[in-house]
Image: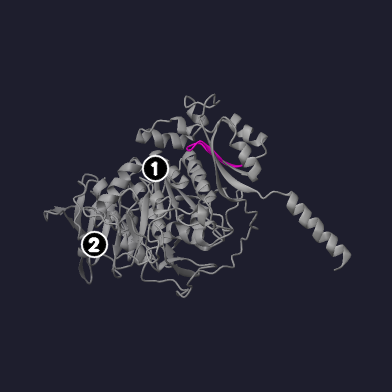
Amino acid sequence: MNRWLFLMLLQTATLSAQTPRLNKYWVTFSDKNNSPHCVCRPTELLSARALERRAKAGIPLDETDLPVNPAYVEGLQAKGARIHLTSRWLNAAAVIADSLTATLLNTLAFVDSVQYVGPDLRIRNVPNPAPKIRMPRNDLPKQPNPDNPYGYSGMQNSLLNLPLLHFAGHRGRGIWVGVMDGGFTAADVLPFFDSVANDGRLMVARDFVERDEYVYEAATHGTSVLSAMAANVPGFLVGGAPDAAYFLFKTEDTGGEFPIEECNWVAAAEYADSMGIDIINASLGYTSFNDPALSHAFGTLNGRTAIGSRGASIAVQKGMVVCNSAGNSGDEPWKHIGVPADAPGVIAVGALDYDGSRASFSSFGPTSDGRIKPDLCAPGLQVVVAGSKDFELGMSSGTSLASPMLTGGIAALWSAFPEKTAAEIVDAVYASADQYDRPDVERGYGLPDLSKAWGTLGGFVYDGDFINNARNGFFASDPRAGTLTFWSMAPLSEPTAVYMKNILGESIPVAFKHHLHRVGRIELEGLSDLPAGTYTLTCVTPGGAVPFMGLVWH
């Protein structure tokens, strides 16, 4: 062997032997005694928007809102540990250290426990604004669908009965959605997100893996998930809440699967809470890890054991809606849901086929302590999502898509009633589901009807066959806006007159000012005094009278 090569190899081996392997550890603290922080100074802990959300729901600040004691953090650093993140809710810190240092940390008086949560994967992703990873399928037409404003996403939105809610003008405006994933490659350049980005509603929050603020990298999974909610290109793809604001969190380390990702999940949820985010979507789940000794057994799926589950449960208690994919293990020997879908209050979302039946891969419940899971279901098989470039579309399947489908729908619903609390919105969504009175461990409480939930919250007497009866189309109106938005199943000639009747058949005098074919708005007079309810509107055209069913709400 060449002498210089031998010396180089010898030097490398020596350095390797001298450099201990670094791991990540979850260090829990015994208390928050002598903390410089105080709930008596709430603006130091939470944003004004977060405090407003808490006040609306009557949720007081408590000790879990206090950051970990900074003296304890300094104590860990003094022993040689580097801080990866801290958790105020669980009173803990994730640190980077070698095994000897971890042993020393366990001797500190203020440390309760030190738990190994994975190796320190020194993988750093290079920012990649030009995506090279293609979606599972990109065989959809690249031309717009002129027959449906939703383009190729019409069926998936209709399964949740979203069109009526959207046509009434409720598309998520004013609602903040936090999205946790492994990366959002090209979400900053794809045209599907132009409207949300140009309106200042596409926000980079934080990368909890690499501890920076660049999230447009590493994976297209998050881009697909985001498109099910935020995309807004009529004729191609329209998400469930295209007018909401989106905050992107990278929590999933694509270099490997270890419990540190649960710690990242909790830290991101805490950050979302402090910002005032309303809804969290996490299309992530944890059951088995690269190190089998760390994997979850079914007995741990009780919402109280896993780090991610304990944190997710607190996120709900803080007044946010949390939607999490139930898991894709229905066809596997491990058929159960994952972490943190097992957490109480978290909406574990299962996947459905377009006929409303459970997709075969969608994970089963219940939790190990016997609670119903999944909680609700949404479209999750062959969901149309953004492709890798330009106006290219793809199809993807999984509870990872079902969760954002429901999240977008809930954001749209909440935007109609911003004064409501998370609990009030969630209760209405559950009550609208198709097996609310007979939940099971395959579909949970079933498929929500979000227009029905909207009607219930608005004080309607809702006809369950409403959409089936609206063969020509339907309309919805908010008298405060002074407009009526309608959807026609076929092109409609310019009407010469418009008539309205209530459910008793009594005529309601109205006048219209203008009309747009297919989907449009009619400015009406005489709606301000109408009680909320179901009405029939008839457009008289040269080709005859065309009736529409619709709702008026206040």
Q: Is residue 170 visible?
A: no
Compared with 218, 300 (above or below) is: above
Q: Is residue 357 magenta?
A: no
Q: Is residue 531 left or right of residue 382?
A: left
Residue segment shown in magenta: 83-93
Percent x, y for residue 235? 42, 67
Amino acid marked by disc 1: Val
Circle 1 SS class: helix
**Colour approach in the figure:** one colour
Identify the image quadrant of the C terminus: top left
Which label number is shown at residue 467? 2
Mark 2 closeness class: few <14, some 14–19, many ≥20 residues within 10 Å: some
The total of numbered circles placed on residues is 2
Mark 1 closeness class: few <14, some 14–19, many ≥20 residues within 10 Å: many
Percent x, y for residue 281? 43, 52
Percent x, y for residue 66? 50, 31
Q: Is residue 318 left or right of residue 259?
A: left
User: In this view of the protein, which residue sits in the foreground, 547 or 191?
Assistant: 191
Amino acid marked by disc 2: Ile
Which label number is shown at residue 113? none
Prevailing SS of the magenta stretch: strand
Identify the image quadrant of the N terminus: bottom right
Viewer-side label of 2, 1 = 1
Circle 2 SS class: helix
User: In this view of the protein, which residue sits in the foreground, 146 or 431?
Assistant: 431
User: In this view of the protein, which residue sits in the foreground, 431 or 462?
Assistant: 431
Q: What distance separates the C-alpha of mark 2 from that of mark 1?
A: 33 Å
Provide the residue designation for mark 1: 316
